[in-house]
Image (tube, grey):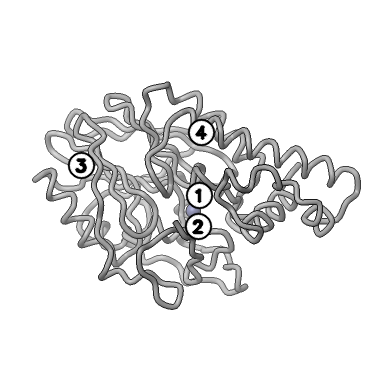
């Protein structure tokens, strides 16, 4: 599996996999949505962008994340394959375009967009991208209409999503979404590519310490039977969360120690604090270096 950076997102550290790309953008016409039945009328949808989770109730659907804008029709078709019920709520796990690109189209159809309050702020006033340019604000219909601070619940037709805030982790507006009846936990990009590293989006308020604290939170929410839908990549388990947390904390502690000893960022990179975990994380030198730099810059 190859990882590509999406230049259009203006984010240094967002990678995703796609079967076909041209000039850094996926060829959306060639992407098929893969639906995985998680039981209890709950499904994971994979296409282009972040994973989507849907929970089907008796009179509506709760959807978690919406991929890139061009995926809207394909996601709707995939949902129509499993239910006649309309999407009533769309919960954003964070503001990144590979998770919120579909907001505008769903919002236009009257879907109620729910997110932590910082997602609204970030969509209305996007931080500058890695290229230094500030993207335009999201259109009004893409902006969450129902925002929360610490936790909230979203219910429709016998289904309930427990939504919790994870402060300053991947971004400053991260949510996890847990469906207790199905024992399904969507982590968003806190656990973005659970076989890789989790990068903090510094311009978006992310920090490595917040990421590790966030892992502690979702590990508490999960049990050994929980089906964990990561931000990207295949379905995961609580054991995967624990393994990823261990790697992230190990690298964090090494970098913190070197930084406290007065080493510069370049010196820490040269010391290769990820040398023994890189292969296990399916990462190359470039991916590891990027993570180490982000850890160095955000570690307390
Ligand atoms: Zn993200």
Q: Which residue does the image show at 63% across and 38% down from the upper left? A: 247
Q: Quadrant of the C terminus?
A: top right
Which comes before the other along the chain, label 3 or label 2? 3
Q: Nearer the viewer, mark 3 or mark 2?
A: 3
Q: Nearer the viewer, mark 1 or mark 3?
A: 3
Q: Cβ of disc 1 within 8 Å of ligand 1?
A: no
Q: Does 233 sit above or below residue 284?
A: above
CA–CA distance in space, label 1 to label 2:
6 Å
For the residue pair 165 and 149, the one nearer the viewer reads as 165
Q: Quadrant of the N terminus?
A: bottom left
Q: Which residue is mark 4?
A: 241
Q: Are marks 1 and 2 in contact (CB under 8 Å)?
A: yes
Which comes before the other along the chain, label 4 or label 1? 1
Position in image of residue 84 (x %, y %):
8, 45
**Residue 61 placement, left or right of 123:** left
Q: Which residue is mark 3?
A: 61
Q: Nearer the viewer, mark 4 or mark 2?
A: 4
Position in image of residue 280 (x %, y %):
58, 43
Q: Secondary structure at mark 4?
A: helix
Label drawn at residue 122: 2
Q: Residues within 10 Å of mark 3 (few under 14, many from 20)?
A: many
Q: Secondary structure at mark 3?
A: strand
Position in image of residue 195 (x %, y %):
51, 44
């Amino acid at each position: 599996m190859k990882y590509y950076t999406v230049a259009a997102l203006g984010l240094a550290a967002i990678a995703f996999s796609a079967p076909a790309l041209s000039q850094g953008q996926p060829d959306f016409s060639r992407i098929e949505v893969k639906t995985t039945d998680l039981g209890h009328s709950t499904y994971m949808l994979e296409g282009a962008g972040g994973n989507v989770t849907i929970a089907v109730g008796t009179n509506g659907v709760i959807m978690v994340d919406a991929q890139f804008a061009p995926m809207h029709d394909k996601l709707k078709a995939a949902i129509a394959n499993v239910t006649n019920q309309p999407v009533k709520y769309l919960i954003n796990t964070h503001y990144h375009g590979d998770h919120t690109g579909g907001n505008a189209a769903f919002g236009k159809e009257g879907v109620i967009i729910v997110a932590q309050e910082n997602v609204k702020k970030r969509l209305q006033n996007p931080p500058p991208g890695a290229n230094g340019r500030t993207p335009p604000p999201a259109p009004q219909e893409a902006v969450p209409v129902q925002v929360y601070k610490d936790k909230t619940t979203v219910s429709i037709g016998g289904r309930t999503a427990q939504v919790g805030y994870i402060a300053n982790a991947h971004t400053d507006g991260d949510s996890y979404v847990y469906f207790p009846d199905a024992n399904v936990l969507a982590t968003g990009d806190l656990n973005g590519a659970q076989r890789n590293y989790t990068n903090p989006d510094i311009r978006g308020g992310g920090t490595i310490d917040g990421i590790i604290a966030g892992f502690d939170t979702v590990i508490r929410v999960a049990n050994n039977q929980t089906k964990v839908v990561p931000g990207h990549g295949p379905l995961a388990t609580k054991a995967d969360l624990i393994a990823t947390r261990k790697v992230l904390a190990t690298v964090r502690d090494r970098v913190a120690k070197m930084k406290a000893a007065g080493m510069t960022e370049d010196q820490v990179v040269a010391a290769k604090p990820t040398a023994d975990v890189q292969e296990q994380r399916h990462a190359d030198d470039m991916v590891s270096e990027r993570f180490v730099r982000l850890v160095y810059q955000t570690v307390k």
